[in-house]
Image (cartoon, helix red, strand yellow):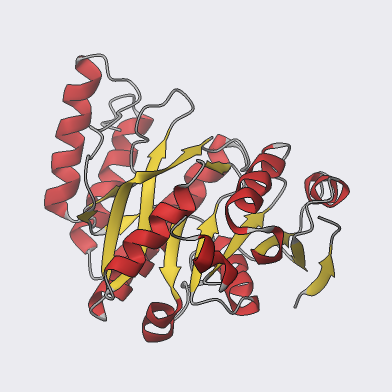
Amino acid sequence: MGSFDHGGGDAFVEARERALVDVVIVAHNSGSLLEEAVASAVAEAGADHVWVVDAGSTDGSVAAVHARGFGVRVLHTGNFGFAAANNLGIAATEAPYVLLLNPDAVLSRGGLDKLMWTAESDPRAGIVGPLVLNPDGSVQADSFGRFPSLVTTLKAYAWRLRERRQGNRALSPPAPTSTQQVDWVTGACMLVRRAAIEDAGPMDEGFFLYYEDVDWCLRLREQGWKVLLAPGARVTHYLGRSQATGSTRSVAARASFCRYCDLHGLWGLKLLSRCKLALRRVGGGLS
């Protein structure tokens, strides 16, 4: 399915030397942002522990990474979806932890150390996510939260309406100040314990794009693992700049949301989503 090539280039220094963590970055026509993501990963983990999964890119972005001489490993495959590409990368790695990083996300200095410290401090921490920031430094909406349900979704709609009326167009939530247990964190950047993956299985490849992260967090929690948010670790996410058009993303998001609802028996929530879509089409959406 894939082929390999190998390009040219305090508390957790010891952890890195013991190769506790590998980084997987899935790239599909990611543009120049991919180089920034790779550079941040190399700075945090070392080139020998960074894998780029090229999911059928045609824009020269992966070739540009190779030309920069980062020295990372590159795994070539087709565009079979975000979950499938991440699974391929995870299978190629061996470290006890895997950091999944989007090609449009940049790790802050010391961010990986802080994620590792949090994970190593709790033996039941299956997934640890950083605080995900917009380029302007605000907290990114929908980067962590409660599992979707009728109650949480209706509360979210009401909150969004209120926030927009108050001028918070980015819908940026308040920044957490301490590590806390959450239902899910975004797959834009998550540290995952390999033992938890072995318990819950890999990402569900039935999700092409979106909701594979929420589903994965749910499955890990069902196996008794914790999902933690560690706000001391930070990543800047240039949301959507490495993906397809807005309409294509919307179609993928709806399909994945419906799959999530079907898998977990959330038929009322699926119906609500369809009603919301119908309202948006006549100009009265709640999004």
Q: Say which residue appears at 86% left-offset and 57% top-offset.
A: 8
Name the residue nearer the viewer: 133 or 46.
46
- The quarter of the displayed image where residue 122 is located: bottom left
Residue 187 in view in this figure: no
32 lies above or below 63 = above
Quarter of the N terminus within the rendering: bottom right
Query: Which residue occupies the extreme front position in the image?
Result: 10
Q: In the rendered picture of this protein, how many numbered marks are placed on residues?
A: 0
Residue 40 in view in this figure: yes
In the picture provided, is 191 more to the left or to the right than 53? left
93 lies above or below 177 = below
Q: Say which residue appears at 51% left-offset and 62% top-offset.
A: 99
Name the residue nearer the viewer: 224 or 286.
224
Q: Say which residue appears at 58% left-offset and 73% top-offset.
A: 90
Q: Say which residue appears at 74% left-offset and 65% top-offset.
A: 78
- The quarter of the displayed image where residue 184 is located: bottom left
The x and y percentages for residue 238 are 54, 35
The x and y percentages for residue 280 are 34, 32
The x and y percentages for residue 241 are 60, 35
67 lies above or below 140 = below
- The quarter of the displayed image where residue 75 is located: bottom right
Quarter of the C terminus within the rendering: top left
Name the residue nearer the viewer: 116 or 272.
116
The x and y percentages for residue 177 are 22, 40
